[in-house]
Amino acid sequence: MDLDLTEDQAALVAAVQRLVDDHGEIPKESRRGSHFYSQALDRALTQNGFTHVMLESGLTALDAALVVEQVSRSPVVIEIGASALVAPHVADALVPRPIVLARGDLMKPQRFLPVAKSMLVEHAGDLKLLPVAPGEVEEISSVYGYPMGRFKAAPDLSASISLGASRIQPFRQWWRLSIAAEAAGMMQAAVEFTVDYVKQRRLFGTTVGNFQAVQHRLAHAYRIGQALHMLVVKAAWSGDAFDANQAASFAQQHIPKLTFDLHQFNGAMGVSNEHLLHFWTYRLKALQSEMGGANAAALDTADQLWGPAEPALV
């Protein structure tokens, strides 16, 4: 089954794609780094209302998910999932961005922390909005495709704004959906990149793409990206936590096999940082364990279906 976008949704995706194409080029001097955060793309999307598409333009969560997915197809990186999908569902006003999403140990490395202005954090049964100042953060070196950082000292949560315990469930739901939407965009872009490469790379007198085993595994990778896209669309349309958990679990479960195959089919170039592939796959690896990974999402799905498990009798 495949569902076409409406004319308005297609126009929205096309508009975002134009901005990504205009500002999504990685400078040559940055191609050997782990990531490139594009301030130009960030500004362009913000000025055109796409980073806060639900609040500023009055569009739906499905529209926001399509924006997140399309932006994530770019090899450059910006913070988009938290701003477009999560914050509008848990905050009553615009949250200064870029935004970090966090729970648990706040001293561990966090995606986007070096560039962040705000943090949405689940803490002690409450959802809090914490302002982030650059002097509080140290950037750390990482291969995971995002600007990664940690606090120099434990953040003072007394300076945070309480958003209420009732916001925790939607926070988890839309965080999981943002993970799935980002992963869907990256998976599709990485597969397209690899398909183009195997059409050109020659081995044993023919192109690598002519080998049936390669075609089968790339078809499987393509299926994963398309299936995840449909799960994201369904979860964004329904607004159901069950669907969001399913999308996140599917995404995180399939990241290891998909990234392994794509790197293998790019040959020696696939394991170097001279090739663009790592700008997608290393970001995918960072998402693989976020919010407890595929197992945590699956267990939450089971709890929704059958209720929390009872303690085992000793």
Image (cartoon, grey):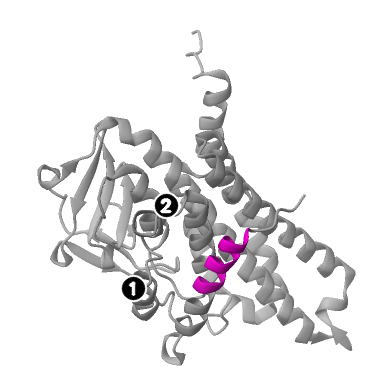
| Residue identified by numbered label 1 | 47
Looking at the rendered structure, the kind of residue marked 1 is Gln
Frontmost of labels 1 and 2 is 1
Residue 168 x, y percent position in the rendering:
34, 35
Q: Is residue 59 above or below residue 76?
A: above
Q: As rendered, which of 48 and 129 lies closer to the eye?
A: 48
Q: Residue at x 66, y 76 (%)?
A: 193
Residue 266, picture quadrant: bottom right
Residue 271, picture quadrant: bottom right
Which label's residue is closer to the chain start, 1 or 2? Answer: 1
| Left/right of residue 70 with respect to residue 261 in the rendered view | left
Q: Residue at x 81, y 79 (%)?
A: 208
Q: Residue at x 38, y 72 (%)?
A: 48
Q: Tag 1's secondary structure?
A: helix
Q: Which mark is residue 88?
A: none
| Left/right of residue 90 with respect to residue 187 in the rendered view | left
Residue 69 x, y percent position in the rendering:
53, 61
C-alpha separation, residue under disc 1 versus residue under disc 2: 18 Å
Q: How many marks?
A: 2
| Residue identified by numbered label 2 | 85
Tell me which segment is drawn in magenta. 6-16
Residue 136 x, y percent position in the rendering:
15, 61
Mark 1, Cα crowd under 10 Å, few <14 / some 14-19 / many 20+, is few
Give the overall secondary structure of the magenta segment.
helix
Looking at the rendered structure, the kind of residue marked 2 is Leu
Q: Is residue 285 above or below residue 107?
A: below
